[in-house]
Image (cartoon, rainbow, N blue to C red):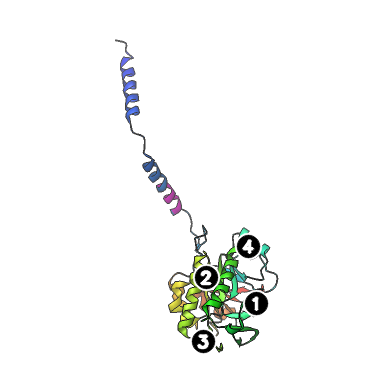
Amino acid sequence: MNQRTPCVVFLLLALLLAACAEPATESEQSTENSERITENQANTPQSPVSNPQSPSAIWQPAPGTSWQWQLTGDIDTSLDVVMYDIDLFDAPQAVIEELKGDGRIVICYFSAGSYEEWRDDAGDFPEAVLGETLEGWPDERWLDIRNQAAIEPIMARRLDTAVQKGCDGVEPDNVTAYANDSGFDISEADQIAYNIWLAEAAHARGLSIGLKNALDLVETLQPHFDWALNEECYQYDECEALRPFTQAGKAVFGVEYEGDPEEFCPVLNEMDFDWLLKRLDLDAWRVACR
């Protein structure tokens, strides 16, 4: 026998075994790929902010999210912050697109509880829903939020406008008519129902929504809102009321209009709030606590 014959036999046996071996199934391949993806994700640093990945994803920022709040003047888009809170009506579309192009989250401000005579849709409000003037704001009047048939369609259109303009979320203002001299007999229950409607209407459109002030309602409304925004809780010694948001892993944004940042920033940083010193007209100027 030729001395190379055993080698040939072994080679044929190896080929036969390889041919008989079953290839990995599609399911096994998918599992293996998924395990690799999961391992890669585990090794990838995670942002403290959950940015939207699809139209159905709603932005819910964690404490420590940097931000800017500017409602007047030419918007300074140069700040290295995660979120900009700007006016729904007045912010130029080009600015929204620029901020979005730079990877910013854009929150759009509008008043959900007051009539502002200069707004484009001011003519949509019937006289019957216009109440007393807001203290310190002579061009604004409280709305009768109990009148769902009149108010909710207007606010729904504003939310639709936010979607059309590319806003990631909204900051509805003046959601405390029940605690003010509105000219209407609005109860706390009425206010809670309206605020929850706002949250649900925003979420139905894929919009993030913040609870503005309304400190006495935080315990009830925190589960319905994605973050909070407060004015001057340090000055009025009210900041403890906002802790349910940070305890739920949600950011608390806020501003002081007076005071020394060296005094209030350490306190608010310790509470894990994200605070700014701003001027009352909310122009571009700011001092950030962190």
Between tags 1 and 2, which lies in front? 1
Q: Tell me if residue 261 is in the magenta stretch.
A: no
- Residue density around tag 2, few if under 14, some if 14–19, many if 20 or more, within 10 Å: many
Instruction: Confirm whether the magenta stretch covers residue 38.
Output: yes
Q: CA distance from mark 1 to mark 4?
A: 31 Å
Residue 111: x %, y % from top left: 59, 77
Q: Amino acid at mark 1?
A: Gly
Residue type marked 2: Ile
What is the quadrant of the C terminus in the image? bottom right
Circle 1 SS class: helix
17 vs 264: above or below? above
Foreground label between 3 and 4? 3
Q: Residues within 10 Å of mark 3 (few under 14, many from 20)?
A: few
Residue 160 in sight: yes
User: Which residue has dot 3 on it?
Assistant: 179
Q: Is residue 241 visible?
A: no
